[in-house]
Image (cartoon, rainbow, N blue to C red):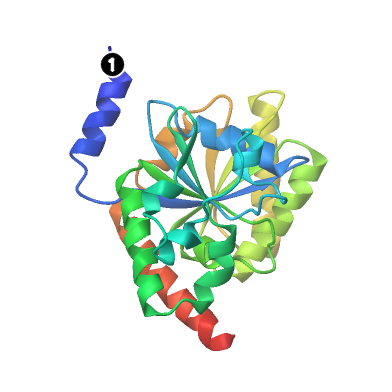
Amino acid sequence: MLHASDQAAGLRRLFRRTPSAVVALFTSGRSPRDLAVQTLTALTEGARRVVAIDEHAPDRGSLLAAFGYPDGGDLLGALQGQHDVTETMREVADGLWVVPAAATVLAVPLLDETPHARLEAGIAELQRRADLLAIHTVGDVRSLTPFARAAGRRLLVVEASGVGARGACQWIKGLAAAGAGSLEIAVSGARDRADATALFASLNDFTARHVGLPLVWRGEVERDPLADAMTTPLGARHPAEGAQAFIRRLRAWSSQAGVAG
């Protein structure tokens, strides 16, 4: 028997007329992958379906390895016509699917017309199947991937520690240099609300003094409804606007990267 939250989620998907929002997930702390797992799991609350495109290689912090699953089935195979994009989706937890894409990230700037058309169609299908499409970004602020650049929303989850705070400052500087319009912040592992808000205030002060990148407080991963925050519009903009623009930006950035290469 379905719970009310399961029924509500089913109705949202049944009557969806627009693709789900896309968010690039950045994490800063002593164990970035554990933070990513915690955050992605939190985003499934309320029977939401989250599809995570994982940019990490099997030996470099992949999500499948974190959940104890063997790696394989990279999204690139679907772009090469070897299988359907849905065959790359691996359900690792209730409401959470992982799509390995480490090889795809490297190949995107080199794709010609046919595989790039398959990429766009595949992304659209993943969006159709999810309440939120998350990009588990490779942790290199110096060279953001096409997926991370194309995402309309960016969420930085910061561990409440010295390591987390210092890493967050590096991400903020890098994302500002990459032209991010704003950055949403969530805190994990704080002793209490005062500790979490103090960390956010210090990051906000850092951005005001050094980079001018607007920060948006999204609360604590353990205590606040992060799923609600990330599946509703950012400001007055309809979430579909950013979702549909994701593919357009990905196409444009891939073309630029291909020319540059």
Is the N terminus in the top left, top right, bottom left or bottom right quadrant? top left
Residue 79 picture location, percent across and down: 42, 65
**Residue 181 seen from this side:** no
Q: Residue furthest bottom?
A: 259
**Residue 88 seen from this side:** yes
Nearer to me, 124 or 86:
86
Up-down: is 64 above or below 25? Answer: above
Identified at 28% across, 17% down, the residue is 4
Q: Answer with left or right where residue 176 lies relative to residue 259.
A: right
Q: Answer with left or right where residue 31 lies relative to residue 90.
A: right
Residue 229 picture location, percent across and down: 43, 38
* Residue 122 quadrant: bottom left
Is the C terminus in the top left, top right, bottom left or bottom right quadrant? bottom right
Nearer to me, 6 or 211:
6
* Residue 12 quadrant: top left
Residue 185 picture location, percent across and down: 58, 45
Residue 103 picture location, percent across and down: 58, 62
Nearer to me, 60 or 157:
60
At mark 1, the secondary structure is loop
Up-down: is 239 above or below 131? Answer: below
Identity of the amino acid at label 1? Leu
Nearer to me, 22 or 176:
22
Q: Which residue is mark 1?
A: 2
Identified at 54% across, 71% down, the residue is 107
Identified at 48% across, 75% down, the residue is 254
